[in-house]
Each structure stands twice: as structure tokens, then as C-alpha cells.
């Protein structure tokens, strides 16, 4: 839910990518676009924010395709567990670099973080180490920068596929060294 300062619900968004087995069947799967909303910040400036839920941020195309051109901040509430905590945090930070936006990621039982549009860490807090009762604060930059990945979009995705195919073809065409027969090996040994 995106709630305004008056306590009114501005937008409701349901997670699109449910975690296999853990969430499927028990949770409502969303189908709508991630919300992008212009908000007034405490200093009076206006900025557009978007939100993704947990696992939704692990899909680069979904994040890229759902951000408005002027969105500068992505909020990601999430709940991690030990096996994915570092992967999940690092993946979200990569989304900030890909899209040229700041990300504020609040996590239950994981690593909460704020990164700027260049992927620099503004704040990082491990709830397992600091405790669940603590609150962390960070000044979140709200300036968007243009990135090649965001502008080129799916072209870069297809370049990865083309590179993989080219590598497979090169390996397959590589000449294998000729093996000599046992009779030839006898002749070669002194």
C-alpha cells in the first residue's frame, strides 16, 4: 500500500512474482504495473517514486519496463532469509545502477539498504546483527541519471544472448587435436 501523510491509501500493489512453493497458492498474485507516484518530500520538493515488492525487484526487465521516465526513487519492502540475504540485497543495488535511480530497500530479517543512482551505498543495516527494534535513517538522493541500460533496454538483453550463441559456436568449431593411432604412437616412441 502507498499511504499519503493523511493516512489515506493512494495505491495498492500486489507482488507479481511469488516465490515458488513458499507463496504460491497462499498469496494473491498481482498483474498490474508497479505504482509510480509523484510525492512531495519533507523539504517541499516533488519527486516521483515507484515501488516493487521483494522478489519483483529481482527481475531487471520488470523494473525497467515499469518505471516512468521521471521516476527517481524505487522503494522495495522485502523479507529475506539467510540463504538469499546477500544475493537479494546486491541484486536490488544493481537495479539502481541499471536504471539510474536511488533505491531504498527495507528488509525484515535481512539487509536493509539505500543506494544512489550510481550504486553507491548510502546506508546498509543488517537486522539480524542490529536487532529488529532499531530504526535506521538515511538521506536518500532523488536525482535520476540516464544510463545506457535504461535507454537501450532490451537491446542489451539480446546482446547477451548473441554473445552466448557466438561463444558456443566458437567452442564447437574449435579444432580438436588429432589423436594418433596405437601404431603411430609405437613409431613415435624411441
Image: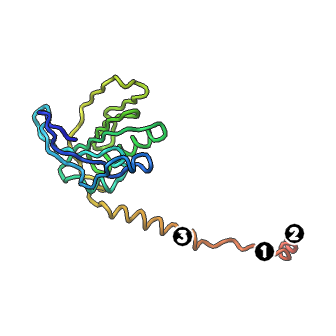
Expressed as whole percent of the image width and height from the top left, the position of residue 113 reads 34, 35
Q: Earlier in the sequence, mark 1 or mark 2?
A: 1
What residue is drawn where x is 30% and y is 60%? 153
Q: Is residue 150 above or below residue 46?
A: below
Q: Earlier in the sequence, mark 2 or mark 3?
A: 3
Q: Are marks 2 and 3 in contact (CB under 8 Å)?
A: no
Which residue is tagged 1?
Answer: 180
Residues under labels 1 and 2: Cα distance? 12 Å
Q: Is residue 107 left or right of residue 190?
A: left
Which residue is tagged 3?
Answer: 170
Expressed as whole percent of the image width and height from the top left, the position of residue 112 reads 35, 34
SS class of the residue under badge 2?
Answer: loop
Q: Earlier in the sequence, mark 3 or mark 1?
A: 3
Expressed as whole percent of the image width and height from the top left, the position of residue 41 reads 14, 35
| Category of crowding for the residue at label 1, using alpha-carbon neighbours closer than 10 angstroms: few (below 14), some (14–19), many (at least 20) | few
Which of the labelled discs sits on residue 189, or is there none? 2
Q: Is residue 185 above or below residue 13?
A: below
Residues under labels 2 and 3: Cα distance? 34 Å
What residue is drawn where x is 44% and y is 43%? 87
Amino acid at each position: 500500500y502507498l499511504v499519503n501523510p493523511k493516512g489515506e491509501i493512494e495505491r495498492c500493489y500486489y507482488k507479481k512474482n511469488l516465490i515458488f512453493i513458499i507463496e504460491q497458492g497462499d498469496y494473491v498474485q498481482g498483474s498490474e504495473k508497479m505504482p509510480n507516484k509523484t510525492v512531495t518530500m519533507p523539504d517541499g520538493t516533488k519527486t516521483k517514486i515507484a515501488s516493487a515488492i521483494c522478489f519483483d525487484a529481482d527481475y531487471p526487465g520488470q523494473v525497467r519496463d515499469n518505471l516512468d521516465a521521471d521516476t527517481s526513487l524505487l522503494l522495495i519492502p522485502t523479507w529475506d532469509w539467510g540463504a538469499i540475504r546477500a544475493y537479494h540485497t546486491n541484486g536490488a543495488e544493481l537495479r539502481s545502477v541499471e536504471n539510474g535511480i536511488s533505491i531504498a530497500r527495507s528488509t525484515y530479517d535481512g539487509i536493509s539498504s539505500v543506494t544512489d543512482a550510481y550504486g553507491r551505498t548510502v546506508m546498509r543495516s543488517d537486522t539480524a546483527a542490529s536487532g529488529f527494534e532499531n530504526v535506521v535513517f538515511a538521506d536518500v538522493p532523488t536525482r535520476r541519471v540516464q544510463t545506457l541500460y535504461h535507454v537501450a533496454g532490451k537491446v542489451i538483453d539480446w546482446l547477451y544472448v548473441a554473445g552466448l550463441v557466438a561463444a558456443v559456436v566458437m567452442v564447437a568449431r574449435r579444432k580438436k587435436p588429432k589423436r594418433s593411432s596405437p601404431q603411430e604412437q609405437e613409431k613415435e616412441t624411441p
